[in-house]
């Protein structure tokens, strides 16, 4: 009996639960499920959704051009160590680098995560959607539209082929007979933004792992500029430094522009071009372009002013026993430049820049966050007052750019200011024993003065004007000359007649000139006896002779003259002069290696003659 009663109670409980569930469903399901909008109100909702979609497209275009960013990161300037700020400027746009070396030599990344991009899209739409709330055209048709004053709540999800936006904003619509309330607006915007962003991450990850852009740059360097090698010659090898830089820039831009990602968006003209194809592990169907552009920073060591010069070996005293001369060379390069990676499909584009850094002819590879020298930024510890006044040789004020060098760091301070007839700068300097104030100005040689900034100081710098002169030397059509002017204040080297102008200041120069003759000059084979003194087993010196055979040699350039001298043009002479003529002593054309050495000996004692007019 009790079992039957318990069974009846259970049935009643189940029935009660069903009744409550159905009642709740009747009450809440209509609120949870979106109601169908009346056809006469649908154009209003369509208008709002189309406006939202248009705002999404605007965000897509901006973010695609700005490496995924709508809101740019805080600006970080570059420095003397690295030219890169954290922005790359392209066609007037500021694009955040995904990888760069900061001004304090810190390797940094700023790759936006997908959630960060979605959040920026949400903030952008929340601000911009007020422009979508102008329903005046529908009000003129008799509709009464009331938009909630509360700020829209937006949710954005980026997919590979679309962006899904949900806007929570209440809009009440009435036409006098019927009404509707629309609180949630779901908008699907067709775009390849998500796909292109994914491709960008794949390419960037491959660049970080393999450094393919740096490796292409190294290959280009060795093929298009003097790096390491030698030539059989008894004359120095000369390269114009600016020409080497310009040729290198053109070659880098051309080769980086040829790089492709393994895919179907291109066809190769020949198998040789497979060299330029990189494999990221996936087949790419989208268009991918790599653009190497300005600004470039190219530094080359060693160099002499505007020239790269390699001197011959085999003509110096003590080296004549090798029987021939050759010119070895080894130049070291620092190369910095940006590469802009562009990925596109249809009308959609995504681009991001990376900084390429070649440090001492080696690709720069470092873990993120690793700091290189200098470990301490001396320039950030400014606390000592200093005054710097700048004048020319006649005590006239000169506007100049001032910097302060302490150990190996250079702190920029900007230009001097004119006040009361004086050009000066007053600022705080870091404490430094035996630092240097450096002044630079157009038309003047760089000047510096040593100061100790461990206490307040005041100093003056005197700058000397640079005078540009035409240069003349009496040489034949098949001759050329290397002329070097050296002084502690200013040095310069010219390769005449390729360079027919020279810049000098009023100071004492030590001048060296070497004259070279072009053309095939044959030095015949020769046999000679050489004798040296060697000790025997008792330590007694005896003369020992041997026969040296020197093969025939053809020289394309051979030294044919030169000399040394001292030139001290004063300021008055330079101010009125326009031409400097140098008389370079000539020697007989050498026919043997010994005669070549005799010419070098002659140069050391021959004197140059100068005529300033």
Image (cartoon, rainbow, N blue to C red):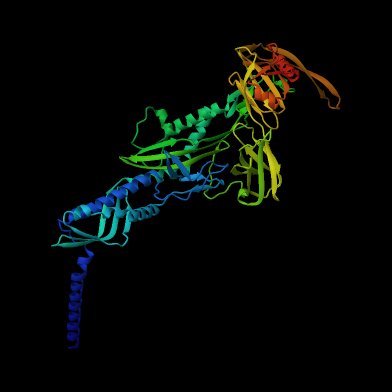
Q: How many marks?
A: 0
Relative to 517, 256 lies left or right: left
Which residue is rendered at x = 61% and y = 38% of the image?
400
Residue at the left extreme?
177
State the image coordinates of residue 480 (x, y, percent, origin top left).
62, 17
Quadrant of residue 335 in the image?
A: top right
Residue at the bottom extreme?
1
Of residues 278 and 147, the one drawn nearer to the viewer in this rendering: 147
Vertical position of residue 597 compared to residue 82: above or below:
above
Relative to 91, 221 lies left or right: right
State the image coordinates of residue 561 (x, y, percent, origin top left).
69, 15
State the image coordinates of residue 537 (x, y, percent, origin top left).
84, 27
Of residues 413 and 309, the one drawn nearer to the viewer in this rendering: 413
Vertical position of residue 217 compared to residue 78: above or below:
above
Vertical position of residue 132 compared to residue 391: above or below:
below
Does the rendering let one see residue 311?
A: no
Which residue is rendered at x = 38% and y = 53% of the image?
120
State the image coordinates of residue 28 (x, y, percent, origin top left).
22, 69
Relative to 135, 471 lies left or right: right
Relative to 444, 538 lies left or right: right
- The quadrant of the rendering that contains the C terminus is top right
Does the rendering let one see residue 120?
A: yes
- The quadrant of the rendering that contains the N terminus is bottom left
Residue at the front extreme?
420
């Amino acid at each position: 009996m009790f079992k039957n009663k318990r069974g009846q109670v259970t049935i009643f409980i189940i029935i009660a639960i069903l009744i409550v569930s159905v009642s709740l469903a009747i009450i809440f399901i209509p609120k949870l499920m979106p109601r169908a909008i009346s056809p006469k109100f649908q154009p209003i909702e369509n208008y709002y959704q189309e406006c939202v979609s248009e705002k999404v497209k605007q965000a897509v275009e901006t973010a695609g051009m700005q490496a995924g960013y709508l809101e740019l990161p805080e600006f970080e300037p570059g420095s003397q160590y690295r030219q890169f700020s954290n922005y790359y400027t392209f066609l007037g746009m500021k694009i955040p680098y995904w990888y760069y070396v900061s001004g304090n030599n810190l390797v940094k990344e700023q790759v936006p995560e997908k959630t960060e991009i979605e959040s920026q899209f949400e903030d952008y739409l929340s601000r911009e959607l007020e422009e979508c709330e102008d329903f005046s055209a529908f009000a003129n048709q008799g509709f009464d539209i009331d938009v909630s004053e509360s700020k829209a709540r937006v949710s954005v999800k980026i997919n590979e082929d679309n962006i899904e936006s949900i806007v929570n904003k209440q809009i009440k619509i009435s036409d006098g007979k019927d009404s509707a309330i629309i609180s949630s607006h779901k908008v699907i915007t067709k775009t390849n933004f998500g796909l292109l962003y994914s491709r960008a991450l794949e390419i960037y990850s491959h660049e970080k792992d393999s450094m393919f852009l740096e490796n292409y740059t190294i290959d280009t360097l060795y093929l298009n500029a003097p790096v390491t090698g030698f030539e059989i010659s008894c004359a120095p090898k000369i390269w114009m430094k600016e020409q080497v830089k310009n040729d290198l820039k053109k070659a880098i831009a051309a080769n980086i522009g040829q790089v492709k990602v393994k895919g179907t968006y291109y066809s190769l003209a020949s198998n040789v071009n497979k060299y330029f194809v990189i494999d990221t592990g996936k087949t790419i169907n989208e268009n991918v372009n790599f653009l190497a552009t300005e600004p470039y920073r190219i530094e080359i060591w060693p160099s002499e002013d505007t020239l790269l010069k390699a001197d011959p070996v085999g003509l110096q005293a003590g080296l004549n026993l090798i029987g021939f001369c050759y010119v070895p060379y080894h130049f070291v390069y620092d190369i910095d430049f940006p590469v802009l990676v562009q990925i596109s499909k249809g009308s959609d584009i995504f681009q991001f820049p990376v900084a390429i850094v070649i440090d001492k002819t080696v690709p720069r590879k470092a873990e993120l966050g690793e700091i290189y020298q200098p470990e301490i930024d001396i320039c950030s510890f400014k606390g000592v007052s200093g005054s710097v006044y700048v004048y020319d040789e006649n005590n006239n004020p000169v506007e100049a750019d001032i910097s302060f060098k302490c150990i190996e760091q250079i702190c920029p301070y900007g230009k001097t200011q004119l006040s009361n007839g004086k050009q000066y700068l007053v600022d705080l300097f870091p404490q430094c024993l035996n630092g240097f104030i450096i002044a630079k100005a157009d038309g003047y040689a760089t000047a510096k003065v040593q100061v100790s900034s461990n206490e307040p100081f005041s100093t003056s710098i005197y700058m000397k004007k640079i005078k540009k002169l035409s240069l003349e030397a009496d040489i034949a059509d098949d001759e050329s000359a290397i002329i070097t002017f050296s002084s502690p204040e200013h040095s310069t080297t010219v390769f005449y007649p390729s360079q027919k102008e020279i810049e000098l200041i009023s100071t004492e120069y030590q001048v060296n000139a070497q004259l070279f003759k072009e053309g095939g000059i044959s030095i015949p084979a020769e046999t000679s006896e050489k004798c040296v003194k060697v000790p025997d087993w008792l330590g007694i010196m005896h003369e020992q002779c041997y026969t040296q055979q020197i093969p025939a040699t053809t020289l394309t350039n051979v030294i044919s003259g030169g000399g040394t001298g001292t030139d001290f043009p004063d300021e008055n002479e330079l101010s009125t002069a326009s031409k400097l003529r140098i008389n370079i002593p000539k020697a007989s054309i050498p026919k043997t290696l010994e005669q070549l050495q005799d010419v070098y000996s002659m140069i050391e004692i021959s004197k140059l003659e100068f005529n300033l007019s």
